[in-house]
Image (cartoon, helix red, strand yellow):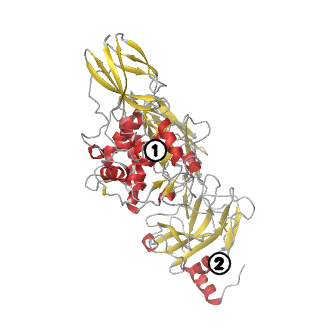
Amino acid sequence: MKVLPGFLLALMLSVSVKAQIVINELDSDTPSTDTMEFIELKSDTPEFTMDGFVLVLFNGSDSGMDASYFALDLDGLTTDINGVFLISNNDVSPVGDFLLFDNTIQNGADAIAIYQGNASDFPDGTVATTVNLIDALAYDTNDSDDEALLALLGLSEQINEGINGNQSTESIQRNNDGTYVVTTPTPGALNDGSGIPFNAIGYSVTNTSFNEGELIEITFTTQEVVTEDLVVEFTLDNDTFDSNDYTGDTTVTILNGSNTMSTSIQLIDDTDDEGDEIMQITFGDLPDDFNRLNDNLEVRIIDNDFTISTWGTPLNPTFDQVESTQPDGYYDTLEGQSNEALVQAIQNIIADPDIVRAQTYTDVIDILKSADQSPLNSNQVWLLYTEQQRPKIDFQTTGGSNVGLWNREHTYPRSRGGYDDIAADDIADGIDIFFPTKADSLRHANSDAHAIRATDGPENSARGNQDYGEYSGPDGNLGSWQGDVARAIFFLTIRYNGLEVVSGNPENSTVGALGDLDILLDWHRNDPPDDYEMNRNNIVYTWQFNRNPFIDLPDLVEFIWGDNIGDTWMNPLSVESSSLQEIVVYPNPNNGQFIITSPSERGNLQIYTLLGQMIHQQEFNSTSQNISIDTTKGVYLMQVNTTTGSIIKRLIIK
């Protein structure tokens, strides 16, 4: 214990005299999950209204600079019949009177303080002070003392929650004499075991997920037998899940002399494709001598009205079922261009400040739910890299553990691109509200959905900011995403000034340059655009008013980075609209050997390169015709003419 100067000791004594509320217990660290942390306050008198007080958390790390990172107004909040008020994560039992997001409370060396004042007095970054200070606790988890933070708060001691080697299972508790002890947590109760005892109530369900149409039984149980009828009210509504989705009584009575009662909730099996939803069971008000063992339990309600697309996933791709929605003449200005003039002509289209729009990074969540929707289930998204689907509702909304969740992956990593969030990016303001943008608006790359994909949370973390080639996906992946990523990178480097794709692997700290170009070119050639990617291009276009030209015109890549550098670009033959969807080409992609089926027995076909050069023609007189061509791998156009009309099909040779 350090010896304090006389004036600081006098200050601390004056604070303790006027203190009406103190920090009674702190559990700042539950390693690996950070879902069971809490702060417990204690008032001098029971049922004390904490108007005029504010709780502030201070960051003692080098980057935190002993400044505030969280402030909570205590106005309107009241301690219980024992003078205790619990602030906790939802997984703490008993559940807190005020709930924090997981991972809110940082590990030490940090501090918690109570002031007279308001949260507005402590915006993030406010340096700790003794002005209007009521009580403070500096703590750590086996860290060195933060002498500066101690001095700023007039404290002489920093308490180590890990002093016994059990920081994950112990908490810091205030003794009645104002000293502290580290021992087994006692959330929601006086640390010395005194006070009025509570009866606790909790509830359970048989499963964590149910299908529409099923019956859910909820069982409520108290720790002790009740001595009079206990009426328990609860709610189920949460976000889009409401009373239209279920029937049943949301009030249950535990009879005098018993400790349990169940009720049944019938889920309505409607015909609406509304997506999977989350039902949340939440207690209403309870008598003063009861607390909650658990609460806000989330139960997944699986919608059985999902739809399946006619096109395939990237793992089982289809081609030519989804047509580009590009306007007539969208790429006309590329005709006859080459080299830098071709690049500039592309940028003039996809970064046109009079047309193109930028959305917020939060809007991207909604874009991905539509653009990355799984063809196998409209309630799920298809994940890049891991090549799997995941429910749309399993989007990661907080930090910490992201297992089983999906989030937004910048295919061109943000740290490599030099762009990041701005304040406006935290707002989802919808498709009709947007930022004006241009080629120099590099910050808008942060929210450009053409280059952001839905990914598995842990895999996104593992990918980091590596160059492609250094990173080639998780073990066992089939590479169905590789061409998609290549075209996203190619798009971004032309859409925004200040980004480029280069050969080799520049240092991961390099800003504005990403590799490896040669690998990305191979990925583009070996994994051509499919229906999934075309559908995605169409959806992003409805938000941003620009398209990825390397999906619509994949051969453009060769004219900028590949085998046709310096050649003059000629737009491909227009694809003729036709109702002859009965004409089928399979397999597609293929190695030059394929079958064409047609409802007509007579016809002919011609196969063209994307530059319009005919490389093969053939008559056929059967509804099923074997075709064999000898050509290099790539994307070709095949015009099929029959007695009933003609249609152009895209042909992929691998």
Task: Please give the name of the residue rendered at 28% of the width and 50% of the height, measured from the top-left corner.
Answer: 432
Q: On the rendered image, what quadrant is the N terminus found in? A: bottom right
Disc 2 secondary structure class: helix
Gap between marks 2 and 1, in whole Å? 60 Å
| Label 2 with label 1: CB-CB less than 8 Å | no
**N-terminal of the two: label 2 or label 1?**
2
Tell which of 26 and 353 is nearer to you. Answer: 353
For label 2, count other residues whose C-alpha is less than 10 Å away and answer few (under 14), some (14-19) or many (20+): some
Tell which of 419 and 35 is nearer to you. Answer: 419
Which residue position holds label 2?
147
Q: Where does residue 178 sit, x and y in percent of width and height?
A: 66, 73
Tell me the number on the disc at residue 562: 1
Disc 1 secondary structure class: loop
Tell me the number on the disc at residue 192: none
Tell me if 355 is positioned left or right of 213 in this view: left
Specify the quadrant of the image occupied by residue 324: top left
For label 1, count other residues whose C-alpha is less than 10 Å away and answer few (under 14), some (14-19) or many (20+): some
Q: Where does residue 524 sit, x and y in percent of width and height?
A: 47, 40
Q: Amino acid at mark 2?
A: Glu
Q: Amino acid at mark 1?
A: Gly
Tell which of 256 and 24 is nearer to you. Answer: 24
Tell which of 474 and 511 is nearer to you. Answer: 511
Q: Where does residue 598 sit, x and y in percent of width and height?
A: 34, 15
Q: Please say whether residue 248 is visible from this viewpoint.
A: no
